[in-house]
């Protein structure tokens, strides 16, 4: 879809849509720019108001008329859409039709995340390296493929399932069971189509490209920790911690990723007439035969965003605006600190399955020098006290000259934070913490 933008270069009032640690980290990075007067978070969370220049607004996103009225009243110059669901529902399109500058793709571009089969076919058509796959529409069809395959296949619900729709079975029986459950409606409409995939192996990395439809600028790379428990065990989560940049992506690997994955993705979007203005998140696996795409997301990763934002300079928001206006030069330079950044997520007991909320949060004497606490899932009780209000509760982030010090600081700060059932992984960044590596028995 071709995009008309209002071509206004004014950049004073920003609206960020979303309620997680990612959106608070974006607000924190954006407020550093002197041009910015006000940042509105819709709906934000209990941590939003403590960010300089920021305030929450509460509005029903599906009431478009009211939304447009409010954004006009607030003189919003740029809208940044955080989560995938409003992007997939076309909020970016509606806002652009109403003459707002928007950072975030339309529903067409968001399909890279909202339909795994569409994304796989997209990659196949462009020869972008990814695991072999089969798109299936019934259990019977899936059964034949699973039983004929030499190894157990990965099973994925096609649509959005909050990161819960992917199964990595150890046996063919488990692949069959996962497929049957999806077709029986475990994920509602999101499971009307199932994608079966060959299982591939290697470390995972996240690469983020800010795109204006034709050109792009890369952010520092990051490595997420998806599994719930230490030593990368347990169920997949939205992300338990991250660090940036990752030494796994050497200059040579990045060259390959650019040539084989990033450039062809953007060229193929263009060929399909999709004017993608937002962040393209490449979830990659570095396999023995080279980098392969595990998934695309149409938004910043969480907690990668909390990890990367403190490395950005004051001009970060200008890049978002350029993407929204479609006028990146492509050689923009992000002046980053030469620091390393790490983030650990404190979660509610039971996450990613069911968990209770409403527990008071105590935050002691935190060392805030080069450290941030971004609220992920918090609210206030009737007396105004901070309480837990989500599976992922707080993102604790620090930067320093090496990862050893970074994580030392993060974990020192975590010792001063408590709420009932607090859980966090103690080995985030184990890949880059030298002492930890030396101490490991394997
Ligand atoms: P996704 O939501 O598609 O990113 O999948 C969630 C996680 O499942 C990924 O981060 C990988 O750890 C794992 N995964 C997904 N697809 C595959 C695959 N084809 N082979 C091995 N692991 C996979
Ligand atoms: N941290 C992974 C994601 O945001 O999907």
Image (spheres, rainbow, N blue to C red):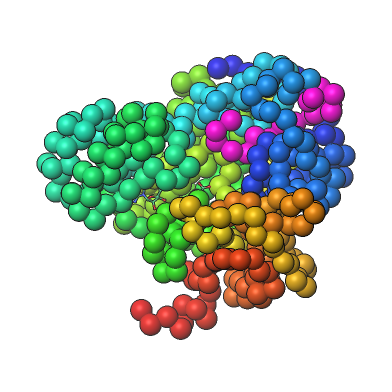
| Rendering coords of residue 169 (x, y %) | 26, 52
Residue 380, relative to residue 401: is it above or below?
above
- Is any part of residue 168 visible from this angle? yes
Residue drawn 77% across the image and 50% down it: 382
- Please identify the residue farthest to the left as the structure is shown: 148
- Is any part of residue 258 visible from this angle? no
Relative to 133, is 94 on the left or the right?
A: right
- Write down the quadrant of residue 409 in the picture: bottom right
Residue drawn 46% across the image and 83% down it: 439
In front: 112, or 340?
A: 112
Residue 83 is a magenta residue:
yes
Residue 134 is a magenta residue:
no
| Rendering coords of residue 424 (x, y %) | 54, 66
Residue drawn 42% across the image and 45% down it: 164
Relative to 127, is 323 on the left or the right?
A: right
Residue 199, relative to residue 188: is it above or below?
below
In front: 93, or 123?
A: 93
Q: Which residues are magenta?
A: 70-86
| Rendering coords of residue 120 (x, y %) | 36, 34
Instruction: Classify the position of the C terminus by image quarter.
Output: bottom left
Residue drawn 79% across the image and 29% down it: 77
């Amino acid at each position: 879809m071709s995009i008309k933008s209002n071509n206004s270069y004014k950049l004073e009032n920003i609206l960020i849509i979303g309620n997680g640690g990612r959106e608070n980290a974006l607000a924190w990075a954006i407020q550093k720019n002197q041009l910015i007067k006000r940042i509105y978070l819709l709906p934000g969370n209990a941590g939003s108001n403590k960010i300089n220049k920021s305030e929450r607004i509460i509005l029903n996103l599906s009431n478009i008329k009211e939304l447009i009225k409010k954004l006009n009243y607030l003189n919003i110059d740029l809208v940044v859409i955080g989560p995938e669901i409003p992007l997939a529902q076309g909020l970016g399109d509606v806002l652009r039709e109403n003459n707002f500058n928007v950072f975030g793709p339309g529903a067409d571009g968001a399909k890279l995340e909202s339909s795994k089969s569409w994304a796989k076919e997209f990659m196949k058509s462009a020869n972008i390296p990814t695991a072999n796959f089969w798109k299936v529409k019934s259990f019977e069809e899936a059964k034949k493929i699973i039983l004929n395959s030499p190894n157990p296949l990965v099973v994925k619900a096609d649509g959005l399932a909050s990161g819960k729709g992917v199964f990595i079975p150890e046996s063919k029986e488990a692949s069959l069971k996962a497929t049957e459950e999806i077709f029986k409606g475990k994920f509602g409409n999101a499971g009307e189509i199932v994608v079966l995939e060959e299982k591939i192996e290697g470390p995972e990395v996240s690469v983020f490209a800010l795109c204006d439809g034709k050109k792009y600028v890369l952010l520092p790379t990051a490595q997420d920790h998806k599994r719930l428990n230490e030593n990368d065990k347990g169920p997949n989560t939205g992300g338990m911690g991250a660090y940036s940049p990752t030494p796994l992506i050497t200059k040579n690997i990045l060259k390959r990723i650019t040539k084989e994955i990033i450039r062809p993705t953007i060229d193929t979007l263009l060929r399909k007439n999709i004017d993608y203005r937002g962040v393209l998140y490449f979830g990659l696996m570095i396999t023995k035969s080279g980098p392969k795409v595990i998934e695309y997301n149409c938004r910043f990763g969480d907690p990668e965003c909390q990890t990367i934002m403190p490395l950005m300079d004051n001009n970060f928001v200008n890049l978002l605006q350029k993407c929204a206006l479609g006028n990146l030069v492509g050689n923009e330079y992000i002046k980053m600190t030469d620091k390393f950044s790490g983030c650990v997520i404190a979660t509610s007991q039971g996450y990613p399955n069911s968990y209770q909320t409403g527990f008071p949060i105590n935050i002691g004497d935190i060392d805030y020098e080069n450290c941030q606490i971004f609220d992920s899932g918090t609210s206030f009780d009737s007396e105004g006290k901070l309480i837990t209000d989500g599976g992922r509760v707080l993102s604790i982030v620090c930067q320093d000259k090496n990862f050893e010090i970074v994580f030392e600081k993060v974990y020192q700060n975590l010792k001063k934070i408590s709420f009932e059932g607090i859980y966090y992984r103690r080995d985030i960044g184990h890949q880059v913490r030298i002492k930890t590596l030396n101490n490991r028995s394997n």
